[in-house]
Amino acid sequence: MGVQGLATLLDNHRRIYRDVEFRRRRLVIDGANLIYLLYFESGLDQNHGGEYAAFENLIERLVTALRTCEVEPYVVLDGGSDPTDKKLETVTQRAKDRIRRAHRAAVDGGKVNILPVLTMWVFRQTLIRLKVPIAQCFGEADREIAALAYEWQCPVLSNDSDFYIFNLPAGMMPISYFQWADVNQKGSKSYIPCKRYYISSFCIYFKIQCQLLPTFAALAGNDYVKLQKIQFAPKANKPLSRLEELLCWLEDFEEPQEALEAAMELMGAKNQKKEMLQSLSVGIEEYQLPPSSLTKFFMHGVVPQFPEESQQVGLIPDWIQRTLMQARMTGDILDVLLLHRMSLSTPVSHKDLPSVNLTSRPLRQVMYGLLLGKEKSVNVEERDREGLQLKFTPVKPVFSQRTQQLELNSLHEAELSVRLKVLLEALGVQEELLNVLPPQLRLPVAVTCYWCIRAQPPPDLKLLKSLLLGMCLKDTLRLSAAVEAESRCCHQKADTDVAHAFSQWQVCMKDSMHLNQLLDFPLPEPDTAGLYQGMLIHQLVHVMRTGRRLKCFLKTDQATVKRYHEMLSVIHQLQSRKVSKFSEGERIAKAQRQPLIDHTNLQLFQLYEDEDVATEIRSSAWVEEELQLDDQLMVKTRYIAKERRNRCNKVELTRKEERRGIALL
């Protein structure tokens, strides 16, 4: 992000920075930048789908350190894309690069800085829970962050090199030098050791005028300006970097316009002079700060006006603007409404596998229908990968009889029962079966049922059970020595097919939560940090596939086991109802856009791993029976009337079942 090569230049000239002891101040934080730096520099896993509980803990520790030093953090996030598409070339190139890096990580298991799918959700939820002030801009946040810091006379915390150019009276502090984990004490006061940057120090060091800094950024090349490389005559005898040559060249100029004219001469751009000057001017204007629109929001909750440059302001209802600004709704909503565009997640994935986002497309289509109800002929352009290529695919919104009766302007005022039915119909589940679960688990379980039906290839029972156990064990899990040994010998490279299956679940979860947000939360938003722990869940799959019993590896409590079995039971019941619907024939198969294969029955049969037992199940009726295991745990599982009646005549079958032990664990 920002000015290409500028951060490296400053790392090579660290005398520009000032060492400070930071405490008792406001601090404006570049939220998007902090997410990436905090996750990647912590060494958390990237290739197994994310370590969300550990990331949540990291955020908690950071906030604790700030409050210990009496620092007041204000976090600002990016919103939708720039409607003018000034950065479209940069954004597109980054998307292509992510696709290549995601494939490389899947092949060799290396860390290539691919952010797991639900990381933003964990960040946002944790800050809200900790009551940290947070705002999500309608567009890119950089100028709003700088304008707020300028008005409050406080520093910015970011690694984005654009903040080396903005005129910030209190300077900026690079996250890389912000030692929040090493809080020091001076007497009774605590402080965070860090480095602070001021543009005055930079300009004095490199002997240029401060008003030339935006010109320097534009000529160097930033997210808005892509010019051919200019060859500047070096003044020094020693080798200089490209940026150092540019800075030496700028020493001779006082005003920006003078430097721009000279640059045009160096490029020999007589025929394209007007276009190039216009491009440079756009890049320079990005560093001119507007009055802050966030001050009143943070102080009084007043939502700022939608940017005037958007010609479609009327498309964004007031209630959505407020929810967006409060960071309770994804900024992707704005891309759909204003640009009819959606940029999709790029998790670690092999190029030969289909995009995981195909699994959750039906959920997004329902969301597009709610957003674009008055524009039924409009498609949404989804930007996703196909192989190693970035592909733009037009996707039609989906409208049902129920959604056609809803208006976006008053969607949040519709009856709760109506909004809930829209959500559950999209997921294909029934409300009454979910009601036996705690409210926080209802959406994850509904999504998991959807995933079992929609994922390609369909997940087997070992994947399902590992996923559900992972959801249950965030707070109560205590890894035994055996599991810790598994972790130490676990290779960084994840099983490609397992990772692909769980990435499908994560994008289903993400898109379901987006739809739940748009419907104004007919189901409670789940604790995202507790939903998925990548390394653990991959280890559980490995343990199950090698035939070992999880009871030997996990120390847990009765409440956790009960919650796990409740979730598994509900999913089986929901899937059973799906099976009965599938038996209606081709009409349902076409509606689902999947082959007419009864994968659900296969998953139910996999509770019994021996073929002879499965054969018995296929020809028998289900009944429920409680078995007491280990004199402590009461586990509900399913048996069949015929098998129970004939049990005494099937000695070998009985012995096999005894050897299996706790089938569901």
Image: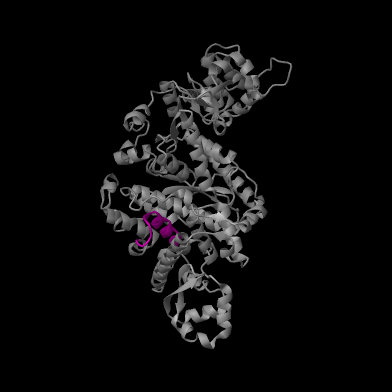
| Residue 436 seen by the camera | yes
Position of 433 compared to 656: left or right? Answer: left
Residue 608 within the magenta-colored segment of the rendering: no
The residue lying toward the viewer, choosing from 152 and 355, is 152
Residue 446 within the magenta-colored segment of the rendering: yes
Q: Furthest-bottom residue in view? A: 649
Where is residue 419 shown, x and y percent of the image? Answer: 30, 54
Residues shaded magenta = 435-450
Position of residue 351 relative to residue 290, above or below, is below
* Main secondary structure found in the magenta portion: helix
Q: How is the structure coloured here?
A: one colour
Where is residue 500 shown, x and y percent of the image? Answer: 56, 56
Position of 360 compared to 97: left or right? Answer: left
Quadrant assignment, res 441: bottom left
Where is residue 650 shown, x and y percent of the image? Answer: 55, 86
Position of 259 compared to 110: left or right? Answer: left
Tally of numbered discs: 0
The residue lying toward the viewer, choosing from 378 and 655, is 655
The residue lying toward the viewer, choosing from 93 and 117, is 117
Position of residue 565 relative to residue 18, above or below, is below
| Residue 456 seen by the camera | no
Where is residue 277 shown, x and y percent of the image? Answer: 51, 22
Q: Furthest-right residue in view? A: 237
Q: Quadrant of the N terminus?
A: top right
Q: Residue at x 63, y 16 (%)?
A: 249
Position of residue 59 relative to residue 189, above or below, is below
